[in-house]
Image (spheres, rainbow, N blue to C red):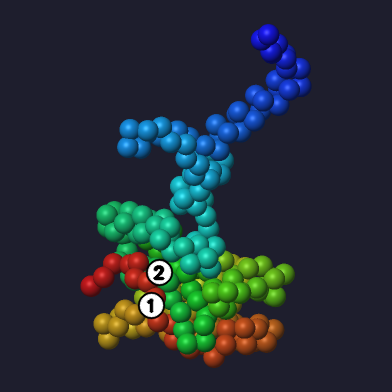
Amino acid sequence: MARQKQKLTSAQKRARKKAKEERQQKYTWVFMNGKQVRLKRPETIDGLEAEEFLRNNADPIWLHQNEMREYMDQEEEQLKNIEESGLDLYINHYCGEWENEEGHFLLIEPIDEVHVHVTYMQSAEKGPLLRPWLNNMPASMMIGTCQEEIDTSLDVELSNPGDRFVLNLDISFQFDDYNTMLQSIIRYEADRHFQKYYRLFGALKPFRRKNWNGANK
């Protein structure tokens, strides 16, 4: 006598359907050597493969801290656009990654022909410097300005615009040394309250280029 097939309840049907959908999302079928093989799908984030999501969305600082510099191509694309449009050559020389012997790190990214974004990190592990004079705001995406007709050095605003608390960066162009960058701090003489924060920048040792992202000579 044939065994009577037991009908599934509505709850069982829903459970099976859900399990099937989960398997379809998790696995895919491909043909290998003439056979159909089930493979696990790559991990996705918001519908994108993890690699593509990181390439499109990850912050350069996070990529640097996680040793994933291969994805840091946004700056290169920006620099390519600057070079192709014939914008200021001097600003290109500052763009890239810099580090000094104290472990302090600079990430400089182009904005336009005279402006850049600057992130100052005390070390690659600690992340952006916290600025106590600005309620511990991270020293990331600070605005740097290089106006060639006035001065070829780069002035980075460490505080609010107009405070004139500035990190001055200077490449020795006159000696054709594009891989060493001197740093100094500039403030108004009356603003002595900023002086107690100098220690956060260490001994202001020169920076050496880690990654060349600017126009070369």
Q: Nearer the viewer, residue 93 or 145?
A: 93
In the picture, the quarter occupied by the C terminus is bottom left
Residue position for label 2: 96
For label 2, count other residues whose C-alpha is less than 10 Å away and answer few (under 14), some (14-19) or many (20+): many
**Residue at 57% over, 66% down:** 140
Residue at the image position 62 percent from the left and 87 percent from the top: 199
Q: Residue at x 37, y 71 (%)?
A: 211
Residue nearer the viewer, 75 or 186: 75
Separation (CA) of disc 2 from disc 1: 8 Å
Q: Residue at x 49, y 44 (%)?
A: 42
Is residue 166 visible in this depiction of the protein? no
- Residue 187: x %, y % from top left: 58, 82
Query: Looking at the rendered structure, which numbered label has been put on residue 209?
Result: 1
Instruction: Indicate the amino acid at tag 1.
Output: Arg
Percent of width and height locating residue 149: 34, 71
Residue, far bottom:
203
- Depicted 54 relative to depicted 200: above or below: above
Type of the residue with mark 2? Gly
Left or right of residue 209: residue 165: right
Tell me which corner region of the image, top left, top right, bottom left or bottom right, holds residue 159.
Answer: bottom right
